[in-house]
Structure formats: C-alpha cells, structure tokens
Image: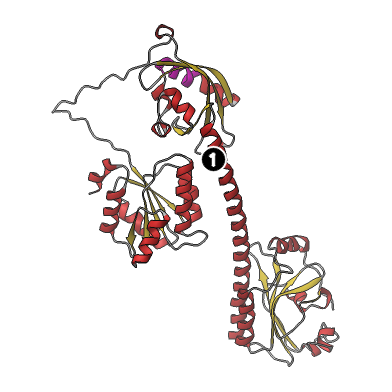
C-alpha cells in the first residue's frame, strides 16, 4: 500500500529543502543518534530517513548498506502522516505491508517503529526509525527513548541550519567590514570635507579634510555637536527651517556660517543628506562642505559666545547632575545577567544586555558605551572574537578605546595573557562578587564623575 501525501506536501518539501541536508556527507552527531537508538531499543537497524518527493534518503544509518529507497515502498512515508510513533509489530501480518519488497526481500522487515521528525513550523521532514527482522513491540520506556532521540535529531537539524546561516552572515559581515574599511580609507584621504552625524547632531565620523577646515584634529570632533562650531543665527536657521525640509525632502544644499578653533569666522557651502534607513542606524546625516573660505569679519554674524554662569552662592549650591554611565553586558547565562542587574540596580548606571558575542558587537556599534562587561565562553561568537571585532571597528571609526572587562572563570596566567592579547582591558573572575565587580567598574569606567556616587 502506497502512503498518500500529506495535505501540506509542497510546503513540507520546501521546509525540508531549507535545511540543505539532502545528499550531504555523513555527520557524527546524526550517526551517534542512530547508534544510540539501536542500542537503547535493541534492534539491528536504525535510520534517520528524510522524505523528499520521490524517495526516502538516509542521513544516518546502522545495519543497512543502502542510502535510499523509493518513497512508494517506504514505511516512513506512512509515519510522517502522524505525530506519534508509528509502529508495525509484524509486517507480514499487516495487509498494508505484507507484499512490500522491503518485507519480502532485503532487509526482510518484520518490525518497524518510526517517530516523525517535526520541525518548529510543524512540518514532518522524515523519521528516526527502528527496524528488526523478527516481530516485536517497543516497551513504554523504549518509546520514550525513541521520542527523546527524535527531538534531538530535529535539534541537530536546527543547529546545523543556524550555524550555516551564521557562517553566511559572518562572511557577509567580513566583506562589508572590508568594504567599509576601504571606504573609510578613501574618505580619510579625500580633499572633500565629509562628516557623519547621529540623530542628536553629534559627529560619529569626521574625515581629515572636514576637521582641518575647522582647525581641529578629527578625534577632537567625535561626539561633539555641530552646533558647537557654528554661529547662533546659523544654528537657529538650520534647526527651524532646514532640518524640517531635510526630513521631508531627504537632502538640502546651502550656505552656513561657523567659526574655527582659533576663533576666526568660517563660511562654506554645504550639502546635507539623510541616510536611508537611518531609524535603524547610529548615523543619521551626511554633511559635506564645499568651497570653505574665511570671510571678512563684517560679512559674517559673529559666533555666539557662551555667557558665563554666575557662581552658585553658598546658600544655593549648584546641584551636580553627572550623566549616567552606560554599561554593556555581553553574557549568555541568564543567571549572571540577572545577578549583574541586581548588583547595579541602585547605582547610577544604565545597563544594556546582549546574549552572545555577535549580538554584543552589533549592540556596541549601535550606541556609545563607557564600559563593556564581556563573558569569554559563549555560543555563536565567543568573547575573544567579539573583542577583536570591536577593536577593529573602533579603529576604523577613529574612536577611543572603550574599556572591556573579561568575565571569566579561568584564572591561570596563560588565560589572563590570552585575554590581554585579545584586547581586553582587565578581567573579573567568576563567580561574580558585587564588591569586586563594582571596584573594577569604578577603576576602568571612562566616566570618572560617577565613581564617587557608586562608592
């Protein structure tokens, strides 16, 4: 008897093909699972069988030499039609299989039991199945074992898929990083004055030509607001008239008035453009200056000078309001994430979390952090690789070095040397202790104004 196709056959086959596993070489995790299934249930044959439109193909097998059979004679084609274990205790006495060539000939199947391999979208991709040449039935414990091992097969399929996708994303990321490095190199050496600004108007990138036009080194401008270098009338015009138009049209060209580091007035024609997809990016605005020149003093509105604030009287001291220290915790263990959150809850720290190294790198690049706490051993990407990518990104962005503290249970000197060589600033030994962690934060945080508050 030929098994009918599932109602969702087309979608099921597409789901199977997404795993890109058909006709691949043997892999140890799958081989181990069929060996374990055969031993636990005391059968001579065990298979991981995947059902495509025309055949059943064996990703792993023990007890048989063939790699596939036609789908129309496959017991597994019947098993994928249900979600529980499909068991045939005596194939010769079952009218569905009595004349099946796999019963009347090799491998002379008399007993069959298969658990469907159901993925997270509820598609049955195939089975983990058991075969014997004598009639029998599985015990309750053996059925439980087969069910658990079937779930492990699916878990391996999912892990294999995620690893392949991650490898592809990392390859794309490396290509993008290489291209970004080339672009930054070109921007650094071009004579055009170019800068990138974030949503608050602060510089995230400044090339040498742009910085030189204002009389600064590039590193001096990073994190500063463009308003600090332009006249009050210019700032007011851009804020009230240009930026609303810019948000609507996406680009604007016109004249600006500013001042150089030495106080000399500066005028230039500029082009402003909003980055596509800027809502998901730390960069919002591209600022390009054309034809900068130093105009006569009478031709430019004088730069606004800050009015000095009166010193606070003894009776009314000026309150101190330091900015909250931004800390990024990259840690895959939920218990440690909760523990650090509790340690820092009552302190003036803003804590953000990432669950593995790759997420930590992406989060770090999308914000500005005063300190990073980084676990070493993590899935997807470990702490060593994450720190290497962060340091490379800081270099290409011309940013200062952010302190990164390793959270590790390894205390050998060679392990400590490895963390230093990877680019970590220091380390804190696990299990984490509150006083030790806070002392490290206060010692290495780049915002020293908060140290007294935290002590």
Report whether residue 409 is seen. no
Query: Residue most toward the bottom?
Result: 134
Residues in magenta? 231-241
Give x and y (percent) for residue 14.
Answer: 74, 60
Q: Residue at x 45, y 23 (%)?
A: 213
Taking the view exactly as shown, the residue that stands out farthest to the top is 298
Q: Position of residue 370 (x, y in %)?
A: 36, 44
Left or right, 83 with respect to 4, comes to left
Task: Give the main secondary structure of the magenta stretch.
Answer: helix
- Image quadrant in which the N terminus is located: bottom right
Q: Which residue is mark 1?
A: 280
Residue 267 in the image: state x and y as whole percent: 47, 15
Q: Is residue 277 magenta?
A: no
Residue 45 position (above or below residue 385) = below
- Residue 235 is a magenta residue: yes
Task: Find numbered disc 1 in the image and state the secondary structure of the residue it sits on.
Answer: helix
Q: Is 262 rendered above or below residue 208? A: above
């Amino acid at each position: 008897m030929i098994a009918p196709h599932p109602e969702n056959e087309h979608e099921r086959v597409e789901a199977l093909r997404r795993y890109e596993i058909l006709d691949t070489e043997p892999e140890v995790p799958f081989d181990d699972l069929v060996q374990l299934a055969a031993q636990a249930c005391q059968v001579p044959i065990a298979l991981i069988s995947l059902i495509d439109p025309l055949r059943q193909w064996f990703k792993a097998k023990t007890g048989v030499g063939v790699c596939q059979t036609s789908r129309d004679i496959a017991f597994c084609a019947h098993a994928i039609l249900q979600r529980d274990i499909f068991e045939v205790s005596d194939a010769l006495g079952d009218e569905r299989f009595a004349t099946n060539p796999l019963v009347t000939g090799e491998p002379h199947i008399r007993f069959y039991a298969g658990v469907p391999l159901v993925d997270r979208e509820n598609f049955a991709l195939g089975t983990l199945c058991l075969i014997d040449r004598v009639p029998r039935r599985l015990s309750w414990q053996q059925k439980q074992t087969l069910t658990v091992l079937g779930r492990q097969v699916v878990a391996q399929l999912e892990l294999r898929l995620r690893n392949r996708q991650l490898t592809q994303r990392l390859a794309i990321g490396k290509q993008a990083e290489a291209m970004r490095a080339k672009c930054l190199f070109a921007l650094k050496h071009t004579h055009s004055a170019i800068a990138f600004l974030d949503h608050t108007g602060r510089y995230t990138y400044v090339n040498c030509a742009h910085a030189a036009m204002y009389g600064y080194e590039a590193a001096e401008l990073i994190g500063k607001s463009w308003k600090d270098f332009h006249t009050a009338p210019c700032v007011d015009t851009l804020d009230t008239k240009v930026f609303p138009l810019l948000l609507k049209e996406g680009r604007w060209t016109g004249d600006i008035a500013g001042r150089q580091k030495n106080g000399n007035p500066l005028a230039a024609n500029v082009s402003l453009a909003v980055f596509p997809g800027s809502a998901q990016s730390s960069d919002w605005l591209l600022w390009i200056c054309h034809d900068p020149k130093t105009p006569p003093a009478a031709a430019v509105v004088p730069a606004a000078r800050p009015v000095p604030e009166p010193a606070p009287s003894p009776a009314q001291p000026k309150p101190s309001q330091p900015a909250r220290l931004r800390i990024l915790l990259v840690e895959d263990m939920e218990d440690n994430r909760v523990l650090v959150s509790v340690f820092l809850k009552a302190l003036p720290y803003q804590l953000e979390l990432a669950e593995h190294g790759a997420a930590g790198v992406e989060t770090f690049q999308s914000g500005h952090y005063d300190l990073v706490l980084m676990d070493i051993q993590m899935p997807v990407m470990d702490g060593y690789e994450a720190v290497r990518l962060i340091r490379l990104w800081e270099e290409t962005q011309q940013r200062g070095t952010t302190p990164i503290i390793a959270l590790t249970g390894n205390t050998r000197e060679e392990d400590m040397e490895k963390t230093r060589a990877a680019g970590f600033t220091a380390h804190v030994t696990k299990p984490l202790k509150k006083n030790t962690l806070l002392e490290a934060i206060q010692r290495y945080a780049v915002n020293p104004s908060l140290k007294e508050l935290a002590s």
